[in-house]
Image (spheres, helix red, strand yellow):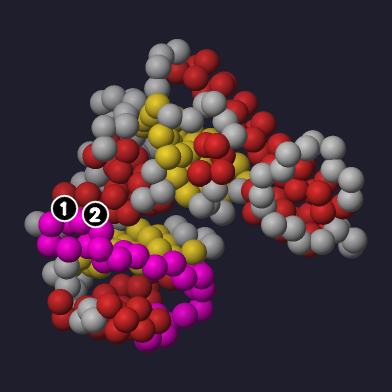
Amino acid sequence: MIFALDVGNTNIVIGVFDKEYQLKYYWRIATDSTKTEDELYVIIRNFFIDKNIKFESFDGVIISSVVPTMLFALELLSKKYFKKEAIIVSNNINTGLKVPEPYTDKLGADRIVDIVGAKVFNYLPAIIVDFGTATTFDYVDENMVYRGGIICPGINISADALYEKSAQLPRVEIEAVDSALGMDTVSQMQAGLFFGFIGQFENIIVNMKKEIKKEVNVVLTGGLSKLFAKYSNQVNIVDEELTLKGIIELYKLNSK
């Protein structure tokens, strides 16, 4: 089996793949950069106990992380408990992605794995949108050449900012709303967040397509991908497992 970790700013996704590289199980925990390798082991061990998985059953470990302060603990976790040297996703491993100079080392691991996942499932050429802590937009052509992208604050960052920076505004749930005319504070905040981010998303896609000047797929992944897909006519594909698919492909490319 293969053990995969996708470490984002908000959540860590833990994936277990079988020997045929099929995803068997996955779990999500909150990202906490203060946790040691031993604390992470205890959390993972509890998941494994429930599925009767043993640490010694794994043939390899791969880690994708956008939280540099966690990498030391994660590499120790791999060595100490899995007895494996982890593959770390970066521009220094074999990805198949071509990033023009002088930007070859500028692309984050989260975006690399999304792009590789899109390649494996024949989504390219595509604009790949990942709704995480930040919302990222990446355009990759049919030859796996990276052509540029956009980074925006995620919708939850905006919701948190309203709550934290305003004395009388509450924390609200992110959800679709039927009306742009809210009648109370909560409904008005929800309408502003929902319609504001739908408008931002669609305007960015329209302007990217104007520059691309050819047909491309718009591929969505991340926690809010289904919500945005339901209310936008700009979306072609929703793949919530795109990141893990990219991670396991990178393992296959680099494990030997």
Tell me if residue 185 is in the magenta stretch. Answer: no
For residue 33, side relative to residue 91 (left or right) = right
* Residue neighbourhood size for the residue with mark 2, other residues' Cα within 10 Å, grouped as few (<14), some (14–19), many (≥20): many
Q: Please, is residue 33 above or below residue 91 in the view?
A: below
Check the picture and name the quadrant holding the N terminus.
bottom left
Whether tag 1 and tag 2 are in contact, CB under 8 A, the answer is: yes
Q: Quadrant of the C terminus?
A: bottom left
> Is 197 placed left or right of 100 in the picture?
right
Q: Image point 85% across, 43% down: which residue?
A: 182
The circle on residue 163 is none
Residue 200: x and y in percent read 65, 33
Whether residue 89 is visible: yes
* Image-quadrant location for residue 201: top right
Q: Amino acid at mark 2?
A: Ile
Q: Residue at x 59, y 34 (%)?
A: 231
Q: Which residues are magenta?
A: 15-42
Q: Is residue 208 above or below residue 52?
A: above
Residue sticking out furthest to the front? 178
Q: Position of residue 143 (x, y in %)?
A: 26, 26
Disc 1, SS: helix
Residue 197: image quadrant is top right
- Residue named by callout 1: 252
Residue 38 in percent (x, y) is at: 37, 86
- Residue furthest top in the image: 213
User: Could you tell me which secondary element the residue under label 2 belongs to?
Assistant: helix
Amino acid tagged 1: Lys
Neighbourhood count class around disc 1 (C-alpha, 10 Å): few under 14, some 14–19, many 20 upward = few
Residue at 47% of width from left, 70% of height from top? 29
The mark tally for this picture is 2
Residue 246 is left or right of residue 222, and the answer is: left
Q: CA–CA distance between discs 1 and 2? A: 6 Å
Residue 248 is tagged as 2
